[in-house]
Image (cartoon, grey):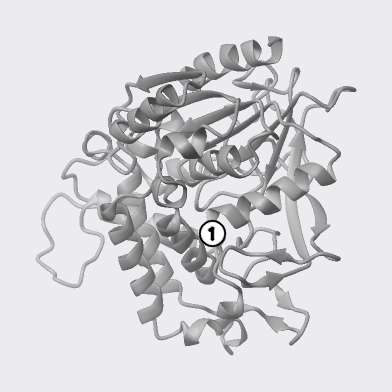
Amino acid sequence: MSQELISERVPAPESSVGLVEKHFATLFAEQPLRTDGGAEFGPVEVAYETYGTLNEARDNAVFVCHALTGDSHAAGRYEDEDRKPGWWDGFIGPGKGLDTDRYFVICANVLGGCQGTTGPGSLNPKTEQPFALDFPVITVGDIVTVHQGLVRHLGIEKLLAVVGGSLGGFQVLEWATRFPDAIRSVLAIATGPHLSAQGIAFNAVGRRAIFSDPSFAKGRYYANGDGLGPELGLAIARMLAHITYLSEDSIEMKFGRRLQDRDEFAYEIGRETEFQIESYLHYQGSRFVQRFDANSYLLLTKAMDYFHLEESHGSIAKALGRTDARFLVVSYDTDWLFPPSQSRDITAALIEARRDVSYVDLPSPYGHDSFLIEVDQLSSIVGPFLERTSAT
């Protein structure tokens, strides 16, 4: 795939939510957030977007939880000229999986993020300097507590559904355990009850790349004279992580062993982009550093590592059995970051807990990224599930 094709502007479809606006809410100003790690923290500013209309009964709200490097901009465009819409635009909108003619959809940036919600790049009111690594270490539970505060701030007592994939899937499972009476359904997509040892290993190598970057400056790179942070380390971390989002089949289909811009080997050891797959990964890394903060990456990957339903609650069944919500669990057959076996473990635990659960393993060549790409097949499952939830 060429960089030109990747950066091509995507036209807005007729079913788009159209132009959207980012909103902000200030929470935990009077009563600080107490994190799972024991820190007291506040106030917290939360960036969020909404799509559709909240009905009079306030019972049609769906909360979307984004993945590791996502943000609150899940659908639509801020301006007509924007090159790309929100990250789940194909799934959110009129007549889509999350039908904005029926539902009031909310998506918020996570605590510790770098797209408007309070994170390590935000100013510490005590020092008037960025928090950097003074920002408290957070958990998925802390992220969900902040988002539940936002939902209450919006005047919503009970969500019709919480939806998310990957780290977003961790969040929806945490919603079921932490706020079991605040949700009517849970849609856990391409996720699991914990990150595997292999997943933790990839995160560890990514963090080490950031720590080892000469520009990291112990996390206080915001004041660097050149204005640059650990761009090389963060780019490497992204390149490594991006490999886990793909499948072997998808890499072969896109790139194979094709060379970039030449027909023969260069026989130059310093040439880093000889193969197309190398060029693609370098492009992903260079684009990523333009929109993401390295300290946020450190915090959020650590939060992923810490998440473990069994260790926290004794078993998955005990954790998820606390809610009467209906569950939809979705996996993808080529996802090796969160393989179908983890989704089957969740499903078996819900059956053990005598909960209402539906499970589907979808075929897709795209690996972990399938839930972001194969939106039509996901919509065909989610749409009817939400309709049945609304009717009960």
- In depth, the one of 17 and 125 nearer the eye is 125
User: Does 15 sit left or right of 308 as displayed?
Assistant: right
Dot 1: few (<14), some (14–19), or many (≥20) neighbours within 10 Å?
many
Q: Nearer the viewer, residue 70 or 263?
A: 70
Residue 142 point in image, percent of width and height: 61, 57
Which corner quadrant holds the C terminus?
Answer: top right
Q: For residue 324, which quarter of the picture?
A: top right
On the rendered structure, is 193 left or right of 152?
left
Q: Tell me, yes or no, if residue 26 can be seen here.
A: yes
| Vertical order, 20 against 14 (above or below) | below
Q: Is residue 79 above or below residue 346?
A: below
Identify the residue at image location x=56%, y=41%: 177
Q: Residue at x 49, y 32 (%)?
A: 188
Identity of the amino acid at label 1? Thr
Instruction: List the single residue furthest toward the right.
Output: 56
- Quarter of the figure with the N terminus: top left
Q: How many marks?
A: 1
Q: Nearer the viewer, residue 264 or 281?
A: 281
Helix, strand, or loop for circle 1?
Answer: loop
Residue 294: percent from the left, percent from the top? 50, 70
Q: Residue at x 54, y 63 (%)?
A: 290
127, above or below 164, in the image: below
* Location of residue 118 (image quadrant): bottom right
Left or right of 130, for residue 139: left
- Where is residue 54 drawn, in percent x and y? 83, 28
Report the residue that reaches farthest toward the bottom.
225
Is residue 86 among what the camera can see? no
Residue 91 drawn at (x, y percent): 58, 27
Q: Is residue 304 left or right of residue 105?
A: left
* Residue at numbered disc 1: 139
